C-alpha cells in the first residue's frame, strides 16, 4: 500500500482534517462518495446455543481454528505497522505483544477450554464467559485504588485488551457472515479489514455506495461478488480500517484503486464531476445493447454473462448478454444453514433459464473450497480448508463433489428437471484428471437413469457436460480431457493462481497475480488449440474476459466466446466491433513471442490506442 497525505488541509463537519490518499486494488469500477461505516465496529453478536451436546471435541476444534485465524490476522496487522512512523510503532507494538500472548498459552484460552470440557459450554459461550471473568478479576485487583490512578488506568487498558481479543475470537468463531450490514446508513461506504464472499453476498447495493477493505485481490470471490453487485470497491488498502472512523467522508474510485479520506472541497467537487462523467459513459455504452457482437469483418463473437447472484438477472438481460456462460451455483449454499433441496434448486435454476429466454445457460456444479465456506456444508460434514494448510490445493470443486456424490446427484437432478429444452449446459469445476471426469459422467448417467425410471420427462438431447480448465494439469491435458468433455470453459482466475503459485485472494502477493503472465497465456493458447482441433466448443469465463484491453488478444488466439460480469459487456462489445480478425491475430502473434509480462501489457495498450 502507498499512503500519501494530500497537499492541502481538508475540513470535515467544521473539524480540520488532513486529506489522505490511499492506493489499493480497484476491483469494481465506479466512483462513490459517502460516509464511512466500519463493518467491524458493530459488536460480534453471539446468539447461538450456550451448551454443546456433550461432545466437547468439535467445540475445542472450533476454538483452535478461531485462535489460528486470529493469530494470522494479527500477524498481518503487525506487518503493516512497519508502514507507520517509528514513534507510532513504538506506541502500538506492546499492544500487539499483549494480543499475541493472549492468543498463546494464556489463562484466557486455558480457562475457555476448561469451560468447554468441564461446563459443557460452546466455544463462543466459553470465550465470552472467560473474558467477562478476566475483566472482572482485573478490575477487582484495583479495589480501594483511586479511580484516576495509573494503576486503575492500567487495569482498564488491560481489560480492553482482553475484550478486543474476545471480540476477534468471537467473530472468527462465528465464521457466519459478519452481518447483513443493515447498520450502515444509506449511501455509506463500508470499510472492513476483510470481507468474505458470504459477507459480500449479503450487501444491499441500494444501501451501500462503496466498499473498501484492507485485504483482498482482484480475482478473489469477494471481488467477483462486489463487481456482480455493481458496487464501486477498492480492496487491499492495507491499514484503512484502522485509520478510518465511522462517519468520516470517503471518496472511492473502484476503477483506479484510489481512496481519499476527508476530501477537501475541491477534491469533493472533482469527485462529483467524475460520478457524473461515469454515469454519462454508461448511458452511451448502453446504446450498444441492441447491436450485434461482431468483429469489424462480420465474424460473430459470443458475449455472455457470469451470474453470481439472482439479483444480477435484470442487469444481465439489460446488458444484452447472449446467455449465461457461467452460473456460479455457490450462492445457493453460501449463507444457508441446511442444504438446498432438489425442489428449491430446481425453482432457482428454472427462474434463471426462463429469464434468459432462448439463450443458453451454463450451470456450474457447486465449486466449493478455497476461501469459501458454508454452514450448510459444514453441517453435513463437508470440511473445507479446516485442516488443510493449502485449502485451494485440497478438497475443492469436483474433488469435493465426488466425495459427496449425494450433493452432486441432487444438483444434477434439479438441473435436469429445470431444463425444458436444450438450452442448458452442465459445467464441472476444478477438473484435473480424466478419471474425475469419467466418475462425474457415471454419476450423471445414474441420475438420468433414475429420473427415467421415475418417468420424469427429460430434455432431448440431454444437457452436455463440460469442464472448467482452471489448473495447469487440465490445460496441459486439454487434448485428452476434450475427448470426453462436451465443451470447455477456461477459468483464468484459478489458472493464473495455480500456474504462478499466487493466492488470488491475498493482498500480500496481489502484485504478483497476473493472468496475462506469458506462461498463463501459453496455457490458454494450448487449451484453445486443443479444443479447436477436436471441434469442442470453448469459452473463457475468468475475469479477463471482461477486460476490453485483453479481448482482442484472446480473439487473436482463436477464442470467440466470452463470459463476464454483465456490466463489462457493452465496453467489450465496443472493442469487438472495432477490431478486425487480422489485426487481432497479428497482436496475438506478437504477444505470444513475449516473455516479459510488462511487455504484454504494453502491447495490449498500444493496440487499444491504435
Ligand atoms: C475461474 O477460476 O476463472 C473461474 C471462472 O471460476 P471462479 O472464479 O468461480 O473460481
Ligand atoms: Mg475457478
Image (tube, rainbow, N blue to C red):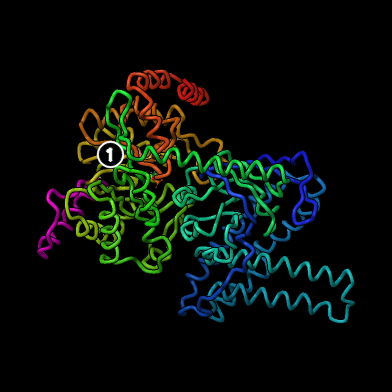
Q: Which residues are magenta?
A: 436-464
Seen in the picture, residue 214 relative to 123 is either above or below; the reply is above
Image point (38%, 42%), residue name: 564
Q: Position of residue 81 (x, y in %)?
A: 72, 48
- Residue 82 in sight from this viewpoint: no
Seen in the picture, residue 530 relative to 202 is either above or below; the reply is above
Q: Nearer the viewer, residue 393 or 167?
A: 167
Which element is circle 1 on? strand
Cβ of mark 1 under 8 A from ligand 1: no
In the displayed structure image, the side of residue 89 where residue 398 appears, left or right: left
Q: Position of residue 453 (x, y in %)?
A: 10, 63
Q: Position of residue 174 (x, y in %)?
A: 53, 67
In the displayed structure image, the side of residue 400 where residue 127 appears, left or right: right
Quadrant location, ligand no. 1: top left
In the displayed structure image, the side of residue 610 where residue 5 appears, left or right: right
How many other residues sit within 10 Å of disc 1, few (<14), some (14-19) or many (≥20)?
many
Q: Find out whether residue 278 is within the magenta segment.
A: no
Seen in the picture, residue 480 relative to 374 is either above or below; the reply is above
Q: Find out whether residue 458 is within the magenta segment.
A: yes
Q: Nearer the viewer, residue 530 or 272?
A: 272
Secondary structure that dominates the magenta span: helix
- Residue 426 in sight from this viewpoint: yes
Image-quadrant location for residue 512: top right
The N terminus, quarter of image: top right
Pointer 1: what residue? 488
Q: Nearer the viewer, residue 242 or 385?
A: 242
In the displayed structure image, the side of residue 36 where residue 345 appears, left or right: left
Q: Position of residue 356 (x, y in %)?
A: 28, 50
Image point (51%, 80%), residue name: 51
Amino acid at each position: 500500500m502507498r499512503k500519501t497525505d494530500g497537499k492541502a488541509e481538508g475540513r470535515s463537519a467544521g473539524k480540520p482534517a488532513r486529506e489522505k490518499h490511499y492506493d489499493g486494488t480497484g476491483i469494481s469500477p465506479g466512483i462513490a462518495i459517502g460516509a464511512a461505516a466500519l463493518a467491524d465496529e458493530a459488536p460480534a453478536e453471539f446468539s447461538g446455543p450456550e451448551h454443546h451436546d456433550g461432545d466437547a471435541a468439535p467445540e475445542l476444534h472450533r476454538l483452535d481454528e478461531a485462535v489460528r485465524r486470529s493469530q494470522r490476522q494479527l500477524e498481518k496487522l503487525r506487518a503493516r505497522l512497519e508502514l507507520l512512523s517509528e514513534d507510532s510503532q513504538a506506541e502500538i507494538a506492546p499492544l500487539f505483544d499483549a494480543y499475541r500472548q493472549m492468543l498463546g498459552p494464556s489463562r484466557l484460552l486455558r480457562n475457555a477450554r476448561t469451560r468447554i470440557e468441564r461446563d459443557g459450554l460452546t466455544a463462543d459461550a466459553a470465550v465470552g464467559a472467560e473474558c467477562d471473568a478476566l475483566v472482572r478479576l482485573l478490575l477487582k485487583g484495583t479495589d480501594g485504588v483511586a479511580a484516576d490512578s495509573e494503576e486503575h488506568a492500567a487495569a482498564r487498558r488491560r481489560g480492553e485488551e482482553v475484550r478486543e481479543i474476545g471480540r476477534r475470537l468471537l467473530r472468527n468463531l462465528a465464521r457466519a457472515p459478519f452481518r447483513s450490514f443493515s447498520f450502515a446508513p444509506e449511501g455509506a461506504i463500508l470499510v472492513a479489514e476483510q470481507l468474505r464472499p458470504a459477507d459480500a453476498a449479503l450487501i444491499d447495493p441500494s444501501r451501500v455506495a462503496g466498499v473498501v477493505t484492507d485485504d483482498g485481490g482482484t480475482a478473489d470471490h469477494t471481488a467477483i461478488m462486489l463487481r456482480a453487485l455493481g458496487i464501486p470497491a477498492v480492496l487491499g488498502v492495507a491499514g484503512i480500517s484502522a485509520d478510518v472512523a465511522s462517519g468520516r467522508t470517503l471518496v472511492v474510485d473502484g476503477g483506479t484503486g484510489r481512496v481519499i479520506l476527508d476530501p477537501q472541497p475541491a477534491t469533493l467537487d472533482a469527485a462529483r464531476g467524475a460520478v457524473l462523467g461515469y454515469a454519462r459513459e454508461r448511458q452511451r455504452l448502453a446504446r450498444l445493447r441492441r447491436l450485434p457482437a461482431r468483429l469489424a469483418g462480420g465474424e460473430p463473437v459470443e458475449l455472455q454473462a457470469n451470474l453470481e447472484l439472482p439479483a444480477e438477472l435484470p442487469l444481465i438481460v439489460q446488458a444484452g448478454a447472449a446467455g449465461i456462460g457461467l452460473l456460479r451455483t455457490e450462492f445457493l449454499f453460501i449463507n444457508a444453514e441446511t442444504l438446498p433441496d432438489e425442489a428449491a434448486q430446481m425453482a432457482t435454476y428454472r427462474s434463471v433459464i426462463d429469464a434468459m429466454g432462448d439463450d443458453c445457460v451454463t450451470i456450474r456444479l457447486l465449486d466449493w473450497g478455497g476461501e469459501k465456506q458454508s454452514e450448510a456444508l459444514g453441517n453435513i460434514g463437508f470440511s473445507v480448508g479446516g485442516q488443510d494448510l493449502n485449502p485451494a490445493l485440497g478438497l475443492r470443486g469436483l474433488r469435493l463433489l465426488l466425495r459427496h456424490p449425494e450433493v452432486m446427484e441432487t444438483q444434477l437432478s434439479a438441473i435436469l428437471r429445470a431444463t425444458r429444452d436444450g438450452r442448458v449446459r452442465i459445467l464441472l469445476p476444478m477438473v484435473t484428471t480424466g478419471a474425475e471426469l469419467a466418475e462425474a459422467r457415471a454419476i450423471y448417467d445414474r441420475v438420468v437413469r433414475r429420473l427415467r425410471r421415475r418417468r420424469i420427462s427429460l430434455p432431448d438431447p440431454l444437457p452436455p457436460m463440460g469442464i472448467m480448465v482452471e489448473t495447469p494439469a487440465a490445460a496441459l491435458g486439454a487434448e485428452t480431457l476434450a475427448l470426453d468433455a462436451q465443451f470447455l470453459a477456461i477459468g483464468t482466475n484459478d489458472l493464473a493462481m495455480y500456474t504462478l503459485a499466487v493466492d488470488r485472494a491475498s493482498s500480500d502477493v496481489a502484485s504478483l497475480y497476473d493472468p496475462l503472465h506469458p506462461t498463463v497465456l501459453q496455457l490458454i493458447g494450448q487449451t484453445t488449440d486443443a479444443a479447436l482441433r477436436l471441434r469442442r466448443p470453448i469459452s473463457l469465463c475468468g475475469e479477463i474476459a471482461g477486460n476490453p484491453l485483453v479481448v482482442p488478444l484472446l480473439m487473436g488466439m482463436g477464442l470467440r466466446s466470452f463470459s463476464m460480469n454483465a456490466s463489462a459487456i457493452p465496453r467489450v462489445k465496443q472493442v469487438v466491433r472495432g477490431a478486425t480478425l487480422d489485426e487481432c491475430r497479428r497482436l496475438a502473434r506478437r504477444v505470444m513471442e513475449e516473455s516479459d509480462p510488462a511487455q504484454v501489457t504494453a502491447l495490449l495498450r498500444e493496440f487499444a490506442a491504435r
